[in-house]
Image (cartoon, rainbow, N blue to C red):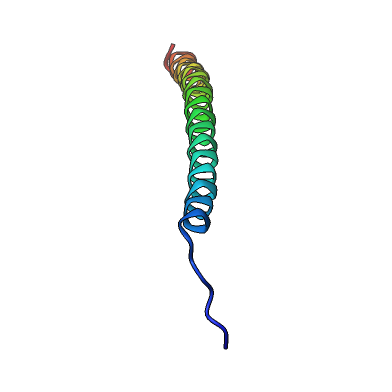
């Protein structure tokens, strides 16, 4: 088996390529972080809307129970 010769230029080229790959990976991770932050913001808004809707349903149910109690005893 023949050994590869690692010259300074070959090592520099390899590390240069590695630096480029790491830079691309960092950019990809930055984009993923932004997407996750956007999704969290969107989910928070949707959950807030759902909470308000559920509160409205609870008030409606309580009003119906109160109205039926008043009708029975009224």
Q: Which residue occupies the extreme right position in the image?
A: 1
Residue lying at the far top of the rendered structure? 74
Q: How many marks?
A: 0
Q: Position of residue 19 (x, y in %)?
A: 48, 45
Measured from the top left, where is residue 67 in percent x and y? 48, 14
| Vertical position of residue 6 compared to residue 22: above or below | below
Q: Quadrant of the N terminus?
A: bottom right
In the image, residue 44 lies at what x, y percent? 46, 24
Closest to the observer: 2 or 33?
2
The image quadrant where one finds the C terminus is top left
Compared to residue 50, the image places residue 17 above or below, namely below
Foreground: 67 or 28? 28
Please report the residue visible at 47 percent of the width from the left and 57 percent of the height from the top: 11
Q: Nearer the viewer, residue 37 or 43?
A: 37
Q: Provide residue 42's location: percent of width, then percent of height.
A: 53, 23
Quarter of the image holding residue 2? bottom right
Near-viewer residue (53 or 44): 44
């Amino acid at each position: 088996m023949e050994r590869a010769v690692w010259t300074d230029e070959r090592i520099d080229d390899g590390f240069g390529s590695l630096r480029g790959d790491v830079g691309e990976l960092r950019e990809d991770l930055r984009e993923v972080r932004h997407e996750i932050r956007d999704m969290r913001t969107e989910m928070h808004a949707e959950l807030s809307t759902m909470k308000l809707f559920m509160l409205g349903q609870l008030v409606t149910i309580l009003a119906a129970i109160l109205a039926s109690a008043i009708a029975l005893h009224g």
